[in-house]
Image (cartoon, rainbow, N blue to C red):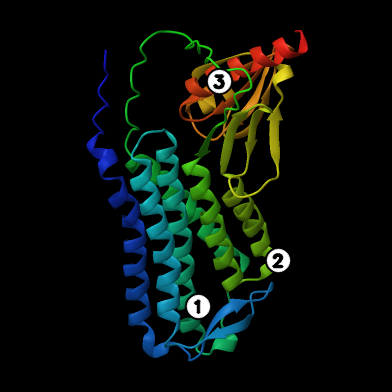
Amino acid sequence: MTLNAPVRPAAIRRRPFVVASPYLLGAAAFLAVFLSRRDRLPDPMATHFAGAGRADGFTALGVFPYAALGVLLVPAALFVWFARAEGGRHANGRALVAVAYGVAGFGGFLLTDLVVANARAGSAEDARLGPWQLAAALVVAAVAAALGLLLAGRSAPAVPEAADGPASAPRLALQEGESVTWTRTVGSRALFACGPALLALGLLVALVADWGSALTLLVPGALLSVMAGARVTVDRHGLTATAPWLPWPRLRVPLARIEEATSRDINAWKDMGGWGYRVHPGRSGLVLRSGDAIVARLTTGSEFVITVDDAATAAALLNALVARDRAHHGG
């Protein structure tokens, strides 16, 4: 029996427009405030502030609005691309919309407040941007993120499973001495979105405050951007996961440690408690999204899980390689 793919709800089809909306509104609000106060703005404008809130960096008045719009619209394009690619297939699509709204709220408020601070001061040297304004920007970001979550709509309904319980993977037939490798890449769109979002926020904080404060956002943003994907490989070495562009860090489960492999649908939050490398009593693994997963039952009785497409084929090959390895070693 062939199952048709579920029709995506209208709310999911609208997600790219929903994601773009706060950035367009933020850009419109910024331009309105900028143009209404342009005659009172100093040239150059204060755009970078020391820890005490005193201005120590400046940008030409004619350049500032273009730079500010770039800070808003570049993340907008990135989040719209992710929303179109995600297509409502996973629950993390709603989280992506919430993150996008939070970034828009933070950036839009801070850039608009920067204009107000310059206009109020009269001269760039007298402009102030204190910690309370950064705190207010975070509050606006939190409210915007909550609004984004409400407007995101529901995720697409899951495709019905053909049978209850785990899908048992058959063993592939391998010829003596035959070398076979299976490999796929997998990534978390939510983590890919959070990484660039933190980088964008970090650059904005560096622009108006200092690099020391920005590093608390830039470092985790860079780590998330690099570690949000993995290449999963099944071969004579066992089950291996590495970063797509780097040889390290590497997760490997040798064939000798594997009792049997199956494929199973895994819910990241319900079954593993979230995304990333997870460790639970009797189960560990790398979970970058919900859905199809390789589940290797180890000789210790515990399970090792990796979520990846075409997990049934990978599990079948893994079973064949385990059986051949045992036969060669007299297991």
Circle 2 SS class: helix
Q: Are marks 3 and 2 in contact (CB under 8 Å)?
A: no
Circle 1 SS class: helix
Residue at the spot 57% in from the left edge and 39% down from the top edge: 231
Q: Which mark is residue 317?
A: 3
Q: Residue 88, percent across and down?
A: 34, 37
Q: Quick one: quadrant of the N terminus?
A: top left
Question: Label 3 crowding class (10 Å Cα cut-off): few <14, some 14-19, many 20+?
Answer: many
Q: Residue 257, percent across and down?
A: 73, 18
Residue at the spot 49% in from the left edge and 82% down from the top edge: 118
- The residue that label 2 is drawn on is 212
Depicted 54 relative to depicted 176: above or below: below
Q: Quadrant of residue 124?
A: bottom right
Q: Earlier in the sequence, mark 1 or mark 2?
A: 1
Q: Are marks 1 and 3 in contact (CB under 8 Å)?
A: no
Cα separation between marks 1 and 2 = 22 Å
Depicted 236 relative to depicted 16: above or below: above
Kind of residue sitting beneath label 2: Gly
Q: Which mark is residue 197?
A: none
Q: Earlier in the sequence, mark 3 or mark 2?
A: 2
Q: Earlier in the sequence, mark 1 or mark 3?
A: 1
Residue at the spot 48% in from the left edge and 91% down from the top edge: 43
Q: Residue 72, percent across and down?
A: 42, 65
Cα separation between marks 3 and 2 = 49 Å
Q: Residue 302, percent across and down?
A: 69, 14
Cα separation between marks 1 and 3 = 63 Å
- The residue that label 1 is drawn on is 117
Kind of residue sitting beneath label 3: Leu
Depicted 247 relative to depicted 294: above or below: below
Q: Quick one: quadrant of the C terminus?
A: top right
From the viewer's perspective, tell me whether residue 90 is left or right of residue 236.
left
Whether residue 266 is visible:
no
